Image (tube, rainbow, N blue to C red):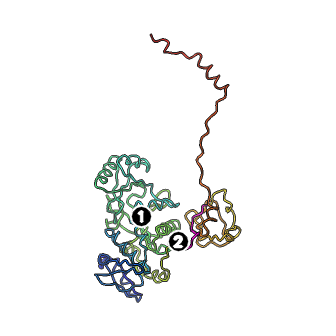
Amino acid sequence: MRISILSNNSTLYSTTRLRNAARARGHTVRVMSTSNFSLDIKSGKPGVLYKGKPASKVDAIIPRISANQSFYGTAVVRQFEQMGVYCLNPSFAISVSRDKLRSMQILSRHKIGIPDSAFAFGKSDIEPALERIGGAPAVIKLLEGTHGAGVMLAESAGVARAIIEALQVAQHNVLIQKFIAESKGRDIRAFVIGDRVVAAMRRTAKEGEFRSNVHLGANTEAIELDEEYTRVAVRAAHIMGLRVAGVDILESDSGPQILEINSSPGLEGIEGATHIDIADAMISYLEDQIKFPDVDIRERLTLNKGYSVVELPIIPKSSLAGKSIGETTLGEQEIQVLSIIRDSVTIPTPSSSEIIHTGDILLCFGKQLTLKALMPEREKRRKSKPKTISQEQIQEVLDSTEHVHDISADRP
């Protein structure tokens, strides 16, 4: 297999490990800098040039996009996708994970633990935003940044306000997050490949530092994640659309809370702590998955007029609740249940005997008209009816005012 590793620095530990692991498994590998690519965008013939010449054909790419090249790096990955080349992490998922606000917005839709967060655009929004997350101390983050850069802890509301105002003046957008005191200076990095956590470590910040990044001198120790933390890590990566991810988790009193999801997680710290050959695991996964190129479902659906994919929430009044998929008439109506989302668990390709529960979300494919009929109606806002007052009530009010003293009568 011909593999290209997209990296601007071929001497980095992670890049070197991936190159050596791929070669050890018999593959041809080339490290290519995203800075040297040009995109050839033509009707029916998307292509790429490397250093001004048509790039040699590859079977797969492993994106290791640096933070300062997120825009162009993901554009290069996207171009390879249009050419039918398998990409270990898709371009859209890299883009989403790099934006702290966007990634938290997406996670907030799902039943998965995250720190309470807020976004303040103007000065007048700062105070209310701080109040919504429970006040100070608060964590302030630039929307883009890696290795702990652009992450600050404000001990008081005044300090938080001053930091945010200063960053806003400098045209920086920031995310404000609740500070999880019980996890100060400590978090978990779970390395997800596919549908499993291949390695995990706990990172503890050095004295006087609340950020637990390895690049900032944090200590690391290998750990075994329990079922809850493993499930949360894998689900968070899948929500982002990442096949390979470093998921940072806070250990809070209320359970695991997702801090951040990294699309190009470093290997040095976690391989050193766990002594697990993660690079080999990544190449092994790539070998298994290369036969399954990305398919843009939304793009394909435009070719099937009248059909769509929708999320069907099961409310208490739903006629589907309490029945198995086979007992419903979904099959007869040409509706296929692709998966069931139940709390934080996804049940893929459920069997006909799977019982549908209230609160489930069914991912269905079928005719739009039929799906529309199954969708629950939006709750209409009830208009308060004007109160009618009887003649007797009016008379009671008039009678009660007979003994009220009119101060205007005392005025000269």
Camera-side residue: 101 or 300?
300
Is residue 384 rendered to the left or right of residue 61?
right
Which residue is at a point 48% across and 75% down the rendered structure image?
194
Q: Residues within 10 Å of mark 1 (few under 14, many from 20)?
A: many
The magenta-colored residue range is 301-313
Secondary-structure class at tag 2:
loop
Q: Name the residue under label 2.
A: 302
Hey, which residue is sitting farthest bottom in the picture? 26
Magenta-colored stretch includes residue 185? no
Pointer 1: what residue? 260
Residue 90 appears in which quarter of the rendering? Answer: bottom left
Q: Which mark is residue 323?
A: none
The amino acid type of the residue labelled 1 equals Glu
Compute the Cα span from label 1 to label 2.
34 Å
Dot 2 amino acid type:
Thr
Residue 49, image x, y percentages:
32, 81
Q: Report if residue 303 lies within the magenta region.
A: yes
